[in-house]
Structure formats: C-alpha cells, structure tokens
Image (spheres, coloured by chain):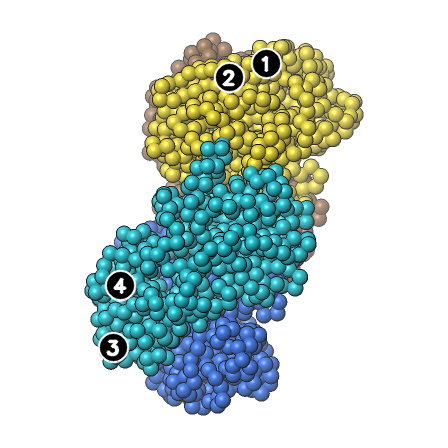
Chain colours: A blue, B cyan, C yellow, D brown
Amino acid sequence: MCGIFGVHGAQDAAGLVHLGLYSLQHRGQESAGIVAVDADGVARAKRRMGLVSEGLNVLDELAGTLAIGHTRYSTAGSSSIDNAHPVLVRFRGGYIALAHNGNIVNASELRRELEDEGSIFSSTMDSEVLVHRMARSKAERPDDQLAEALQGVEGAFSLVVASGNTLMAARDPRGWRPLVIGRLGGAVVFASETCALDIVGAAHVRDVQPGEIVIVDADGLRCRQALAPRDSRRCVFEYVYFARPDSRIFDGGSVDRARRALGRQLGRECPAPGADLVFGVPDSANAAALGYAEETGLPLELALIRNHYVGRTFIQPSQAGRSHKVKVKYNPVREVLEGKKVVMIDDSIVRGTTTRGLVSLVRAAGAREVHMRIASPPVTGPCYYGIDTPSREELIAANLSVDDIARHIDVDSLGYLSLEGMLAAVPGGPEGFCHACFSGDYPTPPPTDPDKLRFGCGC
Amino acid sequence: MCGIFGVHGAQDAAGLVHLGLYSLQHRGQESAGIVAVDADGVARAKRRMGLVSEGLNVLDELAGTLAIGHTRYSTAGSSSIDNAHPVLVRFRGGYIALAHNGNIVNASELRRELEDEGSIFSSTMDSEVLVHRMARSKAERPDDQLAEALQGVEGAFSLVVASGNTLMAARDPRGWRPLVIGRLGGAVVFASETCALDIVGAAHVRDVQPGEIVIVDADGLRCRQALAPRDSRRCVFEYVYFARPDSRIFDGGSVDRARRALGRQLGRECPAPGADLVFGVPDSANAAALGYAEETGLPLELALIRNHYVGRTFIQPSQAGRSHKVKVKYNPVREVLEGKKVVMIDDSIVRGTTTRGLVSLVRAAGAREVHMRIASPPVTGPCYYGIDTPSREELIAANLSVDDIARHIDVDSLGYLSLEGMLAAVPGGPEGFCHACFSGDYPTPPPTDPDKLRFGCGC
Amino acid sequence: MCGIFGVHGAQDAAGLVHLGLYSLQHRGQESAGIVAVDADGVARAKRRMGLVSEGLNVLDELAGTLAIGHTRYSTAGSSSIDNAHPVLVRFRGGYIALAHNGNIVNASELRRELEDEGSIFSSTMDSEVLVHRMARSKAERPDDQLAEALQGVEGAFSLVVASGNTLMAARDPRGWRPLVIGRLGGAVVFASETCALDIVGAAHVRDVQPGEIVIVDADGLRCRQALAPRDSRRCVFEYVYFARPDSRIFDGGSVDRARRALGRQLGRECPAPGADLVFGVPDSANAAALGYAEETGLPLELALIRNHYVGRTFIQPSQAGRSHKVKVKYNPVREVLEGKKVVMIDDSIVRGTTTRGLVSLVRAAGAREVHMRIASPPVTGPCYYGIDTPSREELIAANLSVDDIARHIDVDSLGYLSLEGMLAAVPGGPEGFCHACFSGDYPTPPPTDPDKLRFGCGC
Amino acid sequence: MCGIFGVHGAQDAAGLVHLGLYSLQHRGQESAGIVAVDADGVARAKRRMGLVSEGLNVLDELAGTLAIGHTRYSTAGSSSIDNAHPVLVRFRGGYIALAHNGNIVNASELRRELEDEGSIFSSTMDSEVLVHRMARSKAERPDDQLAEALQGVEGAFSLVVASGNTLMAARDPRGWRPLVIGRLGGAVVFASETCALDIVGAAHVRDVQPGEIVIVDADGLRCRQALAPRDSRRCVFEYVYFARPDSRIFDGGSVDRARRALGRQLGRECPAPGADLVFGVPDSANAAALGYAEETGLPLELALIRNHYVGRTFIQPSQAGRSHKVKVKYNPVREVLEGKKVVMIDDSIVRGTTTRGLVSLVRAAGAREVHMRIASPPVTGPCYYGIDTPSREELIAANLSVDDIARHIDVDSLGYLSLEGMLAAVPGGPEGFCHACFSGDYPTPPPTDPDKLRFGCGC
C-alpha cells in the first residue's frame, strides 16, 4: 500500500510531486518523501513520518526539474524513518532514487544472494535489493541497469526510478499494481492513479504496460519491453477498496463505475426484501450503496457521519468503552435509523472489528433490523503483493463461516458478493485479475519467509 | 464559530472533554483547550493552536472530575495562543474558567466601562469582559456572579463556566447558539451539539433554555431563569451548514432531517427539467442533494471526491494555477460527468470563489450543462452573532444580482431557495429564527465598532 | 533572580534587547521574553521557556524603536509560560509592558486589596499587581501612573516599564537590585548590569537611583524622585556570587575587583599554612581564588574542569551514582591534585550538596588534604528580596555548626569569611548593604505568606 | 574532530554511553548518536543533530549491555542527519555499528574500488567504506573482518565497532588520534579521552596501541596487532588545543600538564618585559597563561569573561557591528585592563578573526599595550587527519609573516612558540608527533581529492 509519483522536465518538479502526493495520500499515511535532482545532477531527499501536509513543506530546498515521491503505509513493526521512501543512494554512476509500490515475493532470497557477496543494507525494505542490483550491473545506461536488476524479481512492483537526468517507470510482468503515464506541457508525469495526474493538470496518456520500462531523458520518452509479460494479474482489490473513486486505473477502468457496478451486482445477488432503506459506510462504500439502491429500489440514506478530523496520533481514551475507536470516527444519525429495517453496505470485511462496532452503533441508534451486504467476497487469505492485509489468523472469514460471522457481528442477515459476480462487474473482467485474497488462487508460491517479508516489504 | 463542552462529576473529566472536542472539531479548527479542576480545587489549563488531535494529548496533567473545553475558529488577525480558550483567571473567590460560543455585540462598550474603572486585559477577546464582570460582582455564589455579569450583555452567547466546584451553562435570552444538557451516569455534560454527547455515551436531556443558567455542584443540578427570555432568534445557519448532520440542536431538531427537507423544498422551488443527474458538494451538501433527488426524481451521483488529508498547513503550490486550492480539495469523477447535464447542489454561496472553482472543475471533466442549486437564500449581510462570514464587500450576493452571480460562476442556471421556503423546511420553523445574514433583519443594532469586534470576538 | 533590559529610540530595538539578554542570561535561564512597540504604538510580545539562544530568534516579528526584555529564573512550582515576563496588558491608556527584578514582600496584601475590588489575575506573579495598580490610577501620564502604583509597595524591585511611547526605569527606595542607565548614540538603554551595556556598545552613564523613576519619551530623558529614599540596602550577594564579574553595579562598583578583594580578605582571615596549592570552583570562584593566592603566596592551579555543554534538560542517569550531577558538570585534574594538600575556594555554600560532591571528586583524584575556604559568611536565612535561596530547612548553615558542616562535606578544615570582612571588602562598604541571608538582619518583616510569595514572586 | 565511546558488559550500556558523550562534547557539537544491542542481538540507533543534551534522551528505547556512541563536528557542507554517526548496517553476519574519529586519506580511492564492484553508498562519509569492506570480507569472526577491512587504509582512525556480541576498538598504525581502554567492574569501556572514563567511574587501563585491535566478547578481552605499527604520529594539536585539560591521552600524558609546560616554554622563548599582567583567552588558554605567569613572574588576571550561554543557533544581530560575534561570546573586564600593558595568551591562531576581535575588545576596555603570545607555532597548513582546519587560503599564517599578522590583529608585539619548544614541552616529546599543520611535514601524500574528502570525512 503505497503511492508513487514522478516528474521529468517541469520547473519546480518537487512542488508538482508534493501536489501529486496529496492525491495519493489514501495509499499510505505513515510517511512521505520526495527526492529532487537539481541542474547540477545533485539529488536531495526529504522524508518525514506522517502525512504529506504535516511534514513536507520544505520544498525550497528541493530545486530541480526531475523529482520523484512516495507515500507509504506500513505495519507498526517496521515503522521508522529509516524505512521511509524514496530510497536514495550514491554509486559508481552517480545516484539512484527509487520509489516502489508492491511487494517482492523473493526479496529474502535476493537479499541473501547480495549479502553473500558482501552487500550491506541500511534498511529492512525489500526495495533496497533493487538499488543494489542496479548498482552491480555493468551496464552504462540507467534503463539497462534497471532492466538487468529486474530479472528474476518475483512479485508485484510498480516503480519510478531516477538516475542521472533520466526518469524511469516500470511495472511487473503481471501488472499487479497500477501505474499511469501523463503529460503536462512538455513534461512527463508518472503516478499510481489518474487522480494524481488530475491534481497537477496532466493529461492521461496510458498505463505503463506490464513488464515495460518507460524512459524519459533529454532525448524524450521511449519505452522497452524489459520483461516478458505473463498472465495479467491486476489487483481486483484496487477496484473494491483501495484506489480513489475519481481515478481510472488498469487501462482506463473507472473506479467509481466499478464500485457502482459492484453495488448493483450485490443488489441482484443479495437483495433485502422488506428493508426500509440502504446506506453505505462512508466514504469508501458510498458508490456501492448507490448502486445497490438503484438496483433494489430501496431509498438511499446518509445514516453514518464520519469525523475526518481524527488524527493519526489519536490515543484512545478509556471512557469510550468497547467500541470507542469506531465511535470517535463514526456517528449514526438517529433520525434516519430509529425503528427502521436497514441495509448497511460495506466494501469488505477484514478483521470484523470495525464492522461489529458499526453494527453496534447502528443498533444503539434505534435500527430495528440490520442487514449487512458486502460488495466483495469473503477475504480468506493474506495478500503477498502489496496490500497490507493481516495474517490468516486475524482474517475473520478465514476462520468463521458466513453464518458465524453474521452472529459475531450481530446482524440479522449477511450477504457477500460472489467471486464470479465481482469479476463480472469490474472493468475489463472477468479475466486477468489477481483475486488470491478471496479465492486462494495465488499466482506465485508464498514467500518462504513471510514474517521477514512483512518487515522487509517495500510498501 | 466555536464548540464548547463541560463535564461535572466524572472520573477523568478532561478525557471526556477531549473526546467531546473531537466531535466539535467542525465548529473550530484554529485552537483547542481544556481546563480541568482537581480534587484540591486547583484549575489547570492546556491550550494549543491546531486540531484537537494535534496538540491536546497531555491529559495526564489534567486531573479532576470537573473540566471544560473549547474548539475555536478565528480570523487570521486575532489568531494567537493568547486568544485561545478557555479563559482561566484567578480572583477573590478562587478561579473562573470560561468557554464561549457566540459574539457579544456591545463588547467594546462593556470593555470601555471596565477600562475606565482601571481593569486590564490580557487578550483581545470579548469573552474576557465576562470574567471581569463576574469577578467584580459582590455576590458569593458563582451562579449569582454569573447572573450579575450577564445583565446588559447584548448579543449571542452560549457559555460553560467553572468556578470552585461548580459547573454552569448559560445561553443568551434569544437562544442564538445551541447548547444541550446530557447525563452520563451520575455526571452532567454540556455540549454545543448532541453529537458530542453521543461520543462520550451521554444521554440527551434537553436544551439549556434561552436566558437560563444551569448549575451543577455538590448539591446536584438546578436551574434558574437568569435573564428574561426575548424573541427567539435561533441561528438558521446552524441547520443550513454549520452543525453536524448527526446532531440534534434547538429543542431536538435533527440537522440531517433539516437538510433533507431543505433539499426537497429546493427541488420544489427550483427544479431543473431536462437535467441528467444531481450531485452535492461533499460532505456538507450531501443530505440536501439526496432530498433534491428524492423530490425531482433525478438520479443521485457522487461526482466530486473530497480529499480529507489536506492539512491546515497546506501551502498552495504555484503550479496548480487559478483554481488550485479547490483542486487539491476536490476532484471530479469524469465518468459520471462527461457529456451530462448536471445539477450541482451546495448549501450556500459566500464569496463565490470555491463555487466558481468547482464549476470550472466540473466543466473540465466534461459536463455539458451545469445547473447550480443552493439550499438557502443569497447571503447578503455579515453575521454579528458568531458565524465568521466576511464583510459585506466580500459577499458575492451583497454585490451582484442572481443573474450576475450565475455569469460570474459560469453556470447555465442558478437557483436559490427562498427565505420562506428555508424557514418552512427547518424544524420548529418558520418563526423564531435569526436569518439576518439572508434577510437583513438584524435583531440588534450593528456593533459600533465591527472591526474591533471581529478581532475581539470570542469565537 | 532575573535580568531586565530596555531600549528607547534605537532602530531594531528588539534586536538590541535580544543581544542584551544574552549578557543577562546568568540572571535567569528558565524563560526569556521581549516586548517591542512599533511605530503605530502596537505592542507585541514573544516569550519562551528556556535560554535566549533557544527560543527568541523570531525578531523579525518585533518591529519598533522601543522594546524591553527579561530573563527569568524561578522555582519549579511556578515554572510556566504563563509566568514568563515581560507582562503585557491592555488598559484604558493603551498598553503596559513591565519587566521586574526583585520580590515584592507585601504582594499578597496588595493582591488581596485588588481582588476585593474585583480584579482578576492571569498569573501567579507578584509583578501583576503593579500593572493593575498602574491601570487603576486616574493619572494621565505613564510616569504619574507608575509613581502612584509604587506607593506602599514594600520590598525589592528594579523595573523597566513601557507604555505608549514612553520607557521608564524605577528602583525601590532601598536600592536592593542593580539597574544602570546607558547611552547608545541618541538612544537610552536600561540594564540590570553594565555587561549588558557593553554588549550593545552603550556607554555607562550612572545607576538609576533608589526611589527614582527615569523617564524617556519624545521629549528626551528626565527623572523624578518618586519615592523617598530609605536606608540603602544594596544586595551584597550580587558582589559575592550573582552578578557577572565584568559588570559594574551599585554606583560603578566592579564585581571582579570585589571578588578579588573578598579572596584577599579570606586569605588574611583564613590562611591554610602547609597547603601546596589553591584553586577555585569554576567559573564563579576564580577571581576569589586568584585573590587568595595573591594574599597567601600559594600557587594557583586549575584543578577542576567545568563542562559547559550540560543542558537544562539533563536527566540524571542512574549509573553515575551518588555524586553524578556534580560529576557531569565538573571533572578534577588528577595530575594537579594527586598527593597534594589543597585549598579549594568557593563563593558560598547553600545546601552543601554540590560542595560535598566536589570534595568527594577532589579526594578521589588523589588530594591528600582538602581545606575549604568560602569567600562569604555562612548563609543562615532565606532571601525574601529576589535571590532564589531555599527555605531555612534546606540551608546547611542554618542547621549545622561550622565544624559539623566541615564533617558533613568531609574536609580537613573549613573557613568562612567574616561578615565584617565581607562588608569591608566590597566596593562602597561596609555600610548600606542588605546582608540578611548572612546576618538575619532583615530590613522588612518577613512576608506573611512566604510560600505563596515563592510561587508568586516576580523573579 | 569527533569523540567516540563504547561499552561492553554493563547494564544499561546506552546510559553509560550517553554519560560518556557528555564528556566528549568538546570533540564535536554538530550531531550525536548511540547504537545499542539488546539481548536478542537487535541493534538500534538514535542519532540527532545538536548537542548530547538536546537530543539523545530517549534512552529507554536503547536496551542492552553493548553500546557505542559518537559526537561529531563537521563543516557546514556535509552537515546532515544522513551523515550522523554511528553508522549502522545489516549484512550477512547480522549487523555492523561503527564510530570513527579521524580521516581516511585514501577514502576516495577505496570508495571508487567499491563502487566499481557495484557497492552503493547512503552517505558521504569516509567511514562508510569501512563497513563495506568488513561486509565483503569472507572471514567469519568480526575481528578478522575488521582486520581485513583495515588493510590498505591510509590516514588517521580511531574506531569502536560492534558486531554480534563483540565490541572492538582499533587505532591506525601511526596512532594519530587518542583512544583509551577502561574497566568498570566487569565491563570494558573505550573512549577518546580519559575524561569520559572518569565520568562513568571507569578505571584507566592503557591506550589502544597503534595498529592494534582490542576485542571484547563473551570470552573476555583480547588484543591483536592487526596492522604493523609505523612511525608514531600522535597529533600534537590534541595537547595544544583539542583534548580536554582533565584528560590523559597518548600513553597517559596529561593535557593540563602539557599546556602548563607550553606556557612556561612560551614564557622562556617570548617574554614581555615591562608588561603589567598576563591573562589567557578562556577557557582553552587558561593553563598556558598560568604557566606563562609562573615562568615570567607577571601577575595572572582574569581579564576576559566568556558567556557560556551562547547557543549553536545564535544569529548575529546587525547592531553589534564589526566584532559582534566575539562580543557576544567574550566581555573584557575594564577594571583589570584599563591603562595597563597586558600580555594575552592564546593556544593558537587559525584564521585570525577571533584574535583580532579580542584585541579590539581589550583595547576598547582601556589596555595601553597588547602583547600577544601564542602557545604553539604558526599554523601554516591544513590538517588531513581529522582536525577541521580551514584550507590554506584561510590560514592567516600561511599567507602573512608574523609581523604582518601582528599588524593585522593590531597588537604591539606578537610571539609564537617555536616548533622545537612545543615538541620539547609536550609529554613524551619531542619525537613521535604529527606536526604537519605547523611544519608542513605531512606523513602521507595529501589526499588526491581534498574537497571531496572534506565533505566525505568521517569526522
């Protein structure tokens, strides 16, 4: 779970990156960083823990027309400024700066190989193996170094890489994570999602293709198929929850339209006859709730209010009791819920804790019946490819049947969208998606050392 | 524009205040503060610039079962930690702590009187005159001191005041600003809105009545009609925009239901025949948009995405151009808008700058026609009673006709709700509201020194 | 224990105050503050906890040709930004800014009088009563207000006060604390000591006289005897320890020469026959040690090294054992001490803790005999006039005989300077000094409420 | 210019390091850092810009019985948290933590070799080449890895290195920089100077010998001659200025005694007949001044007062004029200087700026004649071995004759100690010292890339 952004050829490139990172903040709130390269080829980094708005306003120190940036989410264990991105190192050829979204499944093996040859590591990030491999390449051109470095790397990676006066973007051969190309006057922009192109006013050109390296330097833009494409494995969870609704990802697929379609399909598969109204958990399930209302004819309501001022540093006060975290973040609208049979839509259930708290709030506000509808199938396995899902032990649907989940979260009925229904609803479906966390159909062997991977992952 | 909160009789009162302030953050983001009184009667204050989540996590220093809190919005000129609330002073009887929502219209006169008698002032807040007046009272009991201090005070005030082991709440005789009473076990809670009762789990009892002082001390809760009630002048703008939708204010009126009704009334008064869809400006106009959709039968869409990660410290980068502030905060969903005739709902137009930026975004995303509908009448005058509206010169509707506004913001049509329609739609209407900013019908003479008032206002 | 400084008539007055406060840092390290008055008569304050070098570098916000400043020491109990100086308040006549060095003995009574008339207090400082009294004066001119305010004020005060475009300096009728007048081109400067004149390049003119108010405004400088002078009670401890050696205080008396003379007198009164060498506790006892060496013919050594990098925030690590605080601050030079009979000079002994630690260090470094010589008499009583001595219970010489002290601090011999010897040695002696902490001869009744005074003291 | 410290086998090792760094603060004030290794072999680093007292109080996060620390001085260009020490990296064998005092003269060559083999660098420090070389070693034992890494490394280095549960100390074959061994109960301590042993209560054992590696692990302490010793080149400037006077360095030589002897020798070589008094520039020249007074019979005075509160962040105010920086730091005592012919002693003159400012202060305070005496020879060349002297262009004695310097700094006479005199006076002299900055007799070729070295140096 990370957002990446790069700019080549624009005045105050770091300012544009800064703006772009605002739009990618939903992909990672733990740390943010920018590397900019000035006219003399000197690369400078600024990285801070926290939100883009909290720490990265020292842009006057980041001159230059070439810059890349990163927003990062990570588990607590590896939360540290040492692991903040972008990576910036010096090597024979000058410098390499790299921002990574995804997870390298064989990072432990690659790291061991490098260590056996005497390499040292400053962080616990899988991304650090990539810069080592680039530096060890005998090739002269940055794109040759990058192409060489990516051979044998297994897993999910979307990358923006700067070296010298060259900016590169690359995507793994299965196309797991999104990465789009934009143009802003004479400048080239790379971003995880189109919403970040929009904010800087860049026009959407196309996706970086699976296995492709796109290169921008003084000679302009060119591309090469650095890695042979493999079966497409776009992450369906990007449509379900992760990407921003105003973005288009994966060959222009609209996230908003995907979610609306998921909601309609959910309405077809799991109606709630006799219910009085439907509402979504804000903000991520609003579009699906709208689709569900459309399909079922139930009136849409705004029954939950979300408090957007809750900071990252919120320390839970003891008074608020069992469901306090949920209570600080959401408040039900009693006037809407009182005495009603309600359908509550959410995009997914992971641990079940938040859902259970929400149901409790909704019941306390007077709802007579609560019918939960989920716009995706049960999450039964962890993701090894860049989404920060918890281990199998913590995934409620890996451990309980749907009926037991319904009892656990205390709803009158619970319906999940089918795998087939989900894949049919998303743009470009049903083929070509990774749905391992729903289906168990993992495209790669699991990492040999998943714990270490967790702590070593690039995002 | 402030939020106030008070607790008497609960363990870790400051923790409850802290939690309550999270729910009142929408009423003021400039500074936040808490005063707690410990078992020995020692009052301690913590005040910080910024959000509750940013600065007020030093609660272990604030022991006691009695505490009050405040979130404050203010214009830049008087933005200073010296003006942060609650006010805390020592005087003959011990200490007085006071948190104020509203504006005292004759603060300059009252201050001059006090200065003529040799009083000194540490801040530029109108609230400071109230503690001076309390301290000068010869009465012994805190509520007598407060009652005496409030004689002759003109304007809007909802107050929570602590002195000794007594907590008091008071509301001006016209009942301008909301203030509610709650119970949490044996403790009493006061809050600007019910959403702050909900977050601490307190039950809503009733409003503090206009002109009433509610007193809580070792003898329990009692109340007195300290000031003769006058014609009720509840602020209609609280329903239109300011209060949180999950709150009930003014004798239990639901803000969500009010906004839904405003949207329906707007649909009746200003339909948009031939339009393809309707959407609201998130989050404040969502309920009105839903009402409008209901009334007109137009399909509701989520056409604008709001970025909630934009911090207070955002410094506008030069690249983003004319409408950059709006662009960082909102992004249109092209798939929804492209080629469509759209109705955009907002709660109000103040300066017109944001609206103009939004229309520009919506057009750039491909909308064919933009029909703007506003769920309140044109704002033609400043508020002297606690809402931070700009001066008349900056109010677009005080200077341009509706047709000229439509041209200025570049819409195909523009419709405002009528004054009568608005007053008919809100709970408890149409009588008993202050609508001076829409109608010019000011309940008091304007302050003699409005500029000074602006810098001297309590919230 | 405070330092005060004021400038009238110089460009960037706040910059000069800032510089002057660097030189007065030894008079208070807890907080520092500056108030500057701009060309429009607007007074602005900056106050920070900590050293001048840590917090007061925002001088660009403090425009104007009139400014005052303050460095403050205080006991932990009242350590708070609310008590930081200068005081700045608004009143009928505009503003009053005041910086105070000394202690008002009858502050509690004066405060009670004001409270009975309804005054409110924002701090626990005695200085706040002075601005209340100025504001209550019916007089029009600032100096009349100040003169009126000072009537009946008992105790020690040196003040710089700004109001309108007037700067004033005043000193209590007994002249307890120093305060000097300087000229810098056309500007007038007031400072606690001449070392602060030196740093800004101002020429020393004379002392502000006991009971005098010196006034500087557009008409130039004038003075008035506002309070009838009383028996002079200059603080002898300023010469012994508190003032900086490069300063001249009290009608031009040189602190360095005073300390040298105290050392010589100590040599005469308490020689140490058979000793090998003499050294002082750095830096404050260096001059006395030099005088002692001169008088006795013993060779002077530098046997203790002081670590000047120990910050205010030093948290004592458990490893360092019993005398760790002393060990972090001082280190003995073994080569100098080993096998030697040494005379160690200090300016005074207060609690005895530091002395005991130093003796232990010196012994551990190999000294064969340690003969302690103190360049002042035993401290047997607290100071009520502005020096932060502890209560009688903590003063070692109030509780133990000289022999018992010698045993307690583990020295082979201990000699104190006599009261007569001290008074004969200091410039302008032996009459006219306050030596209450040595002699018990208090010029005023003790404060009725010493505890409250401690927390309420101006410095 | 750095201080290093290491502990093996003590509870709360990081706390001891913290304490030790206080005593080594004079060797570097730019940044400070600690690495501690816990019982599970996990190494954690804390590094901060600024003084030990300002940033390193998070010791509760640094558990373990093995820890090393570093204080660092550096030129502005490479001032960055990325360059703060200790270095901490992961590699095949676990982790390596390293703290370095000195400069590697052939760092550029060694780095190029590593880069040619594909190594990447995270900083611009020469020390980083050492950890790369250790990691590339095929040896299993940490001391074998270190011994191998040091082969062919040219220049000055004193090192403490931790890896696994082993702590090591090493010193270059010429013994340029000091490094001592101490014992604290069963624990072993390494420190740049003995003053840091004193503060933790450790007993001084002996020096780490030139070319030696001292190893401490579960088997206890052992040592090996890893590099063949070469002609001893102890830095004479450590005695002249850099080390703390209470330290013993270089086989137990007392810094205090060295400086006293330098002062006496200076008195013999450069007397000042007819002078009235002598004083030193505090604090560093105090011991030399005492020696000079002893030798010449001139009375010693304390004529300059140093303000120790001047922070690192001091921003020079414009008012203070030409010599303002000096004026904030030093103030002359007029009573001592007025009308006198004075001898001013300093340890060395580098750029001449400070000296010139001091002379101007002393003259302004009324000195009739100023005779400057310097307790070392003219500094005519830069140091490539760890002292941060400026380039030749900025060294006044590399560009002007002694007479011209005297004119430039405006003294009546100027005398430098001779090279022979200096070498005769220091303990263990006259052979075996590096005096390249005085004599031009550089033990190594100058670095090929001195500029890069400056920015890349370890301390």
Q: Secondary structure at mark 1?
A: loop
Instruction: Determine whether B342 is above or below A84 in the image.
Output: below
Q: CA distance from mark 2 to mark 1?
A: 12 Å
Instruction: Determine whether A108 is above or below B150 in the image.
Output: below
Marks 2 and 1: same chain? yes
> In the rendering, at what x and y percent does residue C421 appear?
67, 12
Residue C219 appears anywhere in the view: yes
From the image, tell me which residue sits under label 4. B356
The numbered mark 4 sits on a residue in which chain? B
Tell whether label 2 touches label 3 (CB within 8 Å).
no
Tell whether label 2 touches label 4 (CB within 8 Å).
no
From the image, tell me which residue sits under label 2. C226
Query: Which class describes the residues within 10 Å of circle 3: few (<14), some (14-19), or many (20+)?
Result: many
Instruction: Determine whether A321 is above or below C284 in the image.
Output: below
Q: Is residue D123 left or right of residue D99?
A: left
Q: Secondary structure at mark 3?
A: strand
The numbered mark 2 sits on a residue in which chain? C
Q: Is residue B274 left or right of residue D366?
A: left
> In the rendering, at what x and y percent does residue C69 appear?
47, 30
Query: Which class describes the residues within 10 Å of circle 1: few (<14), some (14-19), or many (20+)?
Result: few
Rendered residue at 36%/75% (across/down): B264
In terms of depth relative to the viewer, which is nearer, C254 or D177?
C254
